[in-house]
Amino acid sequence: MEAAIQENLTRLMQGKTVIAIAHRLSTIAAMDRLIVMDKGQIVEQGTHSELLAKNGVYAMLWQRQSGGFLPEA
């Protein structure tokens, strides 16, 4: 079910500017630009790969959510 939702979201968002707020990072990992906020402040921004490479807040959250089981999109 989740995969079907993800596929439909991807199709609907294609070629559009989208502002998405997500707690499940896999929902937003493929987006062109991610902005990470903490306590109301922007603390990081970049692509999924760039944010993982920074080893900051996003990388920590990704690791916690994936438990090492999700690929680096």
Image (cartoon, grey):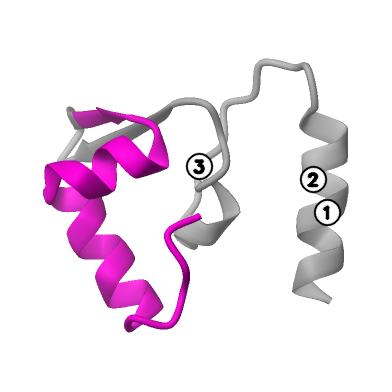
Q: Position of residue 40 (x, y in %)?
A: 20, 33
Relative to 38, 49 lies left or right: right
**Is residue 45 in the magenta section?**
yes
Mark 1 burial class by Cα count in 10 Å: few <14, some 14-19, many 20+? few
Q: Residue at x 64, y 24 (%)?
A: 18
Tell me the residue that label 3 is attached to: 21
Q: Residues within 10 Å of mark 2 (few under 14, many from 20)?
A: few
In the image, residue 61 sits, relative to residue 52, either above or below, namely: below
User: Which residues are drawn in magenta?
Assistant: 44-73
Instruction: Compare marks 3 and 2 and give the one earlier in the sequence.
Output: 2
Q: Which of the two discs, 3 and 2, sits closer to the camera?
A: 2
State the separation of the CA atoms marked 3 and 2.
13 Å
User: Which is closer to the viewer, label 1 or label 2?
Assistant: 1
Instruction: Point out residue 17 in the picture as x, y percentages from the top left corner.
Output: 66, 16
Q: Residues within 10 Å of mark 3 (few under 14, many from 20)?
A: few
Identify the residue at image location x=80%, y=26%. 14
**What label sits on residue 49 in the rendered view?**
none
Q: Total marks drawn?
A: 3
